[in-house]
Amino acid sequence: MTDNLNEIEPEKSSENLAGDNRPIFSVSEISQSLKRTIEESFSHVRVRGEISRLTVARSGHMYLTLKDENAVLDGVCWRGSVSRLAVSPEDGMEVIVTGRLSTYAGRSSYQIVIEQMEVAGEGALLKLLEDRRKKLLAEGLFDDDRKKPLPYLPDCIGVVTSPTGAVIRDILHRLADRFPRHVLLWPCNVQGDGADQQIAAGIEAFNRIPKDGVVPRPDLLIVARGGGSLEDLWSFNEEIVVRAAAASDIPLISAVGHETDTTLIDFASDQRAPTPTAAAEMAVPVRSDLLAQLADDGVRLQRAMNRSLADHTREIEGLVRGLPDPRRLAEEATQRLDERSERLLNAKGIYFDGLASDVAKLAAGLVSPAQQIRAKQSELGGSIRAWRRALTTFVDQKSHDLERASLMLEGLSFQRVLDRGFTLVTDEQGQPVLSAAATESGMVIGVQFRDGDIGAVVSDGGGPKRQKKKAAKTTKNKTRKSDDDAQGSLL
């Protein structure tokens, strides 16, 4: 560190004490020197500690603190590295991080830039696994009612595993031995960075295949991997894989590790197989066993049919022995038919004779229709004569009443008034003029006499103007008379 400091050219300042040759550095110079020294000395380190104060910024960078019982160390993981971490960090998790030490001049502190992260120790992994299992269990991803039955004989099987391992060869070999089926392989990594995403992508891709597409849609899925340590199998404990298995519409068998290995995908799958070979055995039955079973069932069915036919034959023969002779039954029936035919013919004659007797009795009490017609005609003639007399009397009476009304109407007619020398005055519309007040000077009127009509024009009407003039004249005459009375008379 002293060498690095000596490489920095000291700042020349008038503030140097007289006789003191030690250099003076700026804050930035000393910070840069420390940064280079630490990064060169600790360019690749692995640190074990417990995570605390975990924070993810809006930019995607992650900041945390690693601590043990005696010290703390700040840590930062840039956004590009966060997506590649093998574990999802949480507060309180003990981890081993790999990265480089650096300094942050803004706070005069040192920190580790994290590039990789793994859980420290199998105990911590088991605790993380148990916590995750409880979380997914509470969400219902492991419920039995979500599990689907496996098809008895699938036409196509989808396998999600590594294409280079022994797992796929074991599965194909076992399927060929038992019952050859069409197999689709989704190649993926089953360990390491990004393996969980590839496994989940394989499950989802098989589910997205259309049922009637060019590529056949699998009827069954197998997710398989050979044995390994807890860390090797950790990809099958990641949430993305477990959720993809639980959401699969295609029945899924998990075959991860050996019989003693357990991963979270085993709880979310529809069936767990202890080994990949066992998964192939669960997927299909043994063809030779099916053929043998079919042959045996055919023989048993043939024997059962023969026994059933023999039993029914014996039952029919026993029933036949208990039946009477059909010819005797026919003879007795023929005799009964003849007897009842004779009785029917006799009963028919007796029945018609009785009806004839009843008709004769009823006919004796009936009146001849001709007599009834003549009686009704006589009654009708009398009624017609009476009706005619009543109608003649009614018409005569009404005729007398009409004559009297005509005479009365004639007597009341205005024509009789005209005969006595009166006239009828009408206006231009032919309406009667009933008073002199209804006329005006110049009004055209009609005058009807007994022997004809004439037209006339009113020369001095008695309308409202005439009344006013007459009233004024009367007033004038009264005034003049009053003046004459006031003057007195010479006579």
Image: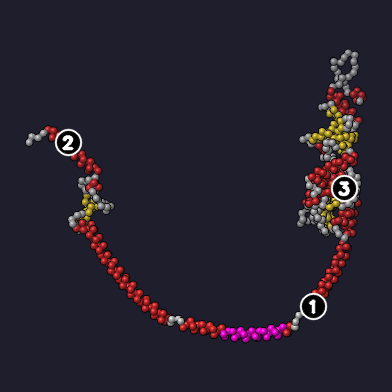
- The correct choice, above or below, for 23 with respect to 424 in the image is above
The residue under the point 91% across, 46% down is 228
**Camera-nearest residue between 336 and 13:** 336
**Looking at the rendered structure, which numbered label has been put on residue 262?**
3
Q: CA distance from mark 2 to mark 1?
A: 157 Å
* 3 or 2: tag closer to the N-terminus: 3
Under mark 2, the amino acid is: Thr
Answer left or right for 428 relative to 277: left
Q: Which residues are magenta?
A: 329-350
Q: Name the colouring of the figure.
A: secondary structure
Residue 417 on image: x %, y %? 21, 56
User: Which residue ends up furthest to the top in the rendered image?
Assistant: 18
Q: Is residue 44 visible?
A: no
* Residue where numbered disc 2 is placed: 479
Residue 137 on image: x %, y %? 81, 46
Answer left or right for 380 relative to 27: left
Residue 305 on image: x %, y %? 82, 71
Answer left or right for 229 relative to 398: right
In the structure shown, which secondary structural element does the residue marked by tag 2 occupy?
helix
**Mark 1 Cα-neighbour bin, 10 Å: few <14, some 14–19, many ≥20:** few
**Camera-nearest residue between 74 and 166:** 74
**Looking at the rendered structure, which numbered label has been put on residue 318?**
1
